[in-house]
Amino acid sequence: MSGHTDMVLVNDEGLRIDGRTAEEKRPIKIEAGVLSNADGSAYLEIGKNKVLAAVYGPRECHPRHLQDPTKAIIQCKYNMEAFSVSDRKRPGPDRRSIEISKIIAEALEKVVLTELFPRASIDVYIEILQANAGTRCAGLTAASVALADAGIPMRDIIPAIAAGKADDHVLLDLNKEEDNFGQADVPLAIVPSTDEIVLLQMDGNMTREEFDHAIDLAYKACHEVYDVQKEALKKRYTSMKEEVDSDE
Amino acid sequence: MTDKIEVFPGDEVAEEEEYLASDGTFADNGKIYASQIGILELDDNECVARVVSPNPPNILKTGDVVYAVVSDIRNTMATADVVAKDGTTRGIGNETYATIHVSKISQGYTDDVSKELRKGDFIRARVIGTKPSLQLTTKEDHLGVIRSLCGQCKTEFVKKGHGLYCPVCERSMPRKLADDYGDVKI
């Protein structure tokens, strides 16, 4: 969004620097239940992004003043590793990661049946191992798979994906170059069963028509991501059943 | 008859006219949806739809056997912090602060809580209520203190008759002991 480049982000044939068309997302891979000490976990790769999500809880909420006697609270921690970007990132929470933690927690609160666990806290940890634009979407996608893996009751699984604009083209799922040198970035997360929006931000400028087009692209892609999420959970469930069978 | 299908959160599983939403499901606008991954069970006898999750949160229910540490002794009750549920490894999902009323400690009559339990004792207990707060009982042979340290020298008490005995301080203490005190693997 900020820099300028002579790089051609979208060529005359409508292809992007990584060979995708404007309406194509990066290849996505999700694996559920990768960590044995967490109650639920997921590992996700989308393009060059690598994300690990872990869920603990519901468990007693500490510090106590954060407890809500009517429902559980969701505490989310989004963290980028020092080695996740090309320059070393100074470790620890910063303004950006605090914001992302907040919006992800709020998105998840909309689907988790928090009223079943008064006073409890559900802790979600998202670690970005490798970043290449679109990590908040990748983090949220992984976190909702981890929540489902932890058996936490929820209305639906949330998929998320970004759309944007670069070189005056509306593009789906921006990569790093398109994000840095493009004109707009619109991350979107939805509840697939009702098509409700639980996360929508916009960085940069777009016309109303471009925005509508971007949202349409992202909606369609979200439903595709949702299928990948379900597939990951199904695989996890089958392997868990085999473990139980072999124990008996 | 029970049907067995794999479901995901958000999947529509039944109509509310036919079934009641139970564990792992929620009702919305006349329909019942799954809220967990697992196997769907439509119980026609009880008219209940439930999803059996392979990895459910650890929520205490009445009847569960739990392990706890006594945190305080009062005149009519003891309080304890529940640390684990028997047979599970996942952390406790709901409140862990529990109370044991003086009448629920032992089978016989108890006039003084401190003759049965002391602060710091590890106990095995059964949940007898979860609302408004967690209540426990140790009124069974298998329930009661499973590990305890001497209040003066912190050596582990050994069982002697119906009470405990410290081999270092050479003093005895009365306790409500579980029948397997001394050989419980924690």
Image: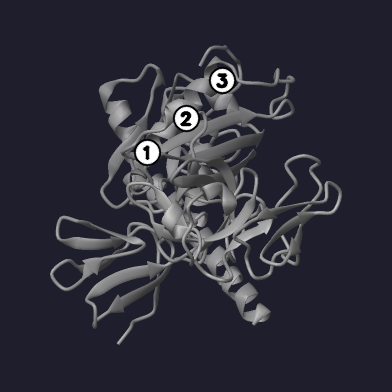
Residue pictured at 37% horizontal, 38% vertical: A109
Placement of B42 over or under B115, stated as above or below? below
Q: Please identify the quarter of the rendering in which residue A216 is found.
A: top left
Q: Which mark is in front, 1 or 3?
A: 1
Residue identified by numbered label 2: A64
Q: What amino acid is at disc 3?
A: Asn
Up/down of A178 relative to A74, above or below: above
Task: Kindly identify the amino acid type of the residue bearing the numbered disc 1.
Answer: Glu
| Residue nearest the observer in this picture, B76 or B38 | B76
Picture residue at 13% right of the left edge, 69% below the top: B17
**Residue A109: mark in rendering:** 1
Residue A153 percent across, percent down from the top left:
39, 54
Mark 3 chain: A
Disc nearest the viewer among 2 and 1:
2
Q: Which of marks 2 and 3 is in front?
A: 2
Q: Earlier in the sequence, mark 1 or mark 3?
A: 1
- Which amino acid type corresponds to the residue marked 2 in the rendered image? Arg
Chain under numbered label 1: A
Label 1 vs label 3: CA separation?
Answer: 30 Å
Q: Which residue is drawn at 66% across and 21% down?
A: A92
User: Residue at left 26%, top 72%?
Assistant: B48
- Residues marked 1 and 3 touching at CB (< 8 Å): no
Query: What residue is shown with label 3?
Result: A180
Q: Is residue A124 above or below residue B136?
A: above
Residue B60 in sight: no
How far apart in space, not on screen, are marks 2 and 1 (Cα)? 19 Å
As drawn, the label of residue B49 is: none
From the viewer's perspective, tell me whether residue B11 is left or right of residue B123. Answer: left
Residue A197, percent from left and from top: 30, 37
Q: In which quarter of the image is the C terminus of chain A?
A: bottom right
**Quarter holding residue A159:** top left
